[in-house]
Image (cartoon, rainbow, N blue to C red):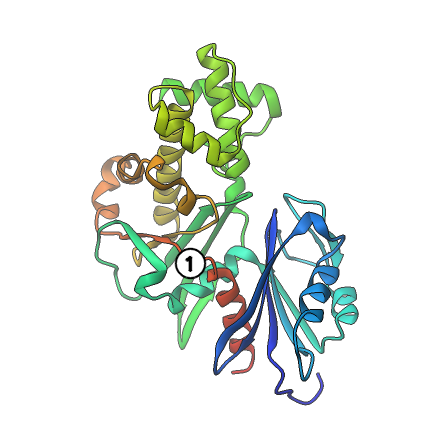
Amino acid sequence: MTAKSDAPALVADIGGTHVRFALSTAADGLGDRQTFDCADFESPALAAESFLSGLQLGERPRLACFAVAAPIDADRVEMTNQVWRFSVEETRRQLELDRLEVINDFTAAALSIPTLGDQDRRRLKQGEARAGSPLAILGPGTGLGVSALIPQPGGWLALSGEGGHRDLAATSEREWQVVELLQRRCGHVSAERVLSGPGLVVLYQAISQLSGVEARELEPGGVAAQARREPEGPAGEAMTLFAGWLGAVAGDLVLTLGARGGVYLAGGILPRLGEAFDEERFRTRFLAKGRFRSYLEPVPVDLIVSEEATLRGAASHLIALGN
């Protein structure tokens, strides 16, 4: 690396639909934010260059962190739910960076948790966080992200995994019908298959087919709006199943990780669903773990409402590198 620069760092939240950029400094936090459609650019480097070219910069960033909705285990990054494929090293050179860190987007979301204020989250389930316990984070966006913060001396360790691709478990006759239909259609039925923006549409279409009703051409927001108008129809049932399955997956994550420090729901979908998201159904299925209900009852669940959480986590990752 070259000598330390006073230029702000570049941070990015690269999802399946949008890419958000910001400049970050340890002293001032985030600034100069901008969001682009991923489809408008052939690569993250071109999107980043468009962002930087529109700023009045005395010095270009020399350090960057991209939080990406994809598994990160080599120089070559392949996005799970969109077409971007890129080399970390080639992108670093294109942007004239001294260092480019690329981490999973939900690893970054997990790293943001210690930075969240009361205005950045809304409590969905009351509880008392147990100090010194892991924290779990998951949430539907273009896919289903999953991560966790594990306490360690001096701070936290953020896990990087692909828990959204775990098998989707059915616990009722209707859920079995949905899973069986989707198995015939696509083979493996992961949690992400229904617990995501596109997944909510898939779920609505499956319920419509099972109910003998022609499905409308709806986006995720349209499914939620239709559910509010006709709560007894296929969209309303889809929203109920969506909330229940998300609660079940969240409860499983707490049991797997021992995450008695709390659960955080993130992603771009939940804050936009509003009252169509059945919070009571979520809580019921979260707790429905038989003999271990009492283990889950004290665990609080918060919904992250800040759109900047992943960017904050990317910035936190860079700050930790300097310590």
In terms of image quadrants, where is residue 235? Answer: top left
Query: Residue 252, image x and y in percent?
Result: 37, 42
| Residue 250: % across, % down | 37, 44
Q: The disc labelled 1 sits on which kind of residue? A: Ser
Front one among 109 and 323: 109
Report whether residue 22 is seen.
Answer: yes
Residue 298 placement (x, y as % from top left): 21, 51
- Is 5 situated left or right of 289 in this image? right
Quadrant assignment, res 49? bottom right
How many marks overall?
A: 1
Vertical placement of residue 214 versus 205, above or below:
above
Residue name at image x 76 percent, y 75 percent: 96
Q: Give the residue displayed 60% in from the left and 79% down from the top.
A: 8
Query: Element type at marker 1?
Result: loop
Q: Which residue is under mark 1?
A: 306
Q: Which of 88 and 95 is in front in this view?
A: 95
- Image quarter where the N terminus lies is bottom right
Of residue 294 and residue 88, the one placed in the foreground of this image is: 88
Residue at point 79% right, 68% down?
94
Give the class, few, some or many, for how many residues have Cα within 10 Å of label 1's Cα (few <14, many ≥20).
some
Q: Is the residue 12 above or below the residue 231 in the image?
A: below
Viewer-proximal residue, 279 or 51? 51
- Residue for point 44% across, 65% down: 112
Query: Could you tell me residue 229's position as x and y percent?
Result: 36, 26
The extreme top residue here reads: 212
Q: Can residue 170 be seen in this view?
A: no
For this orientation, the residue located farthest to the bottom is: 3
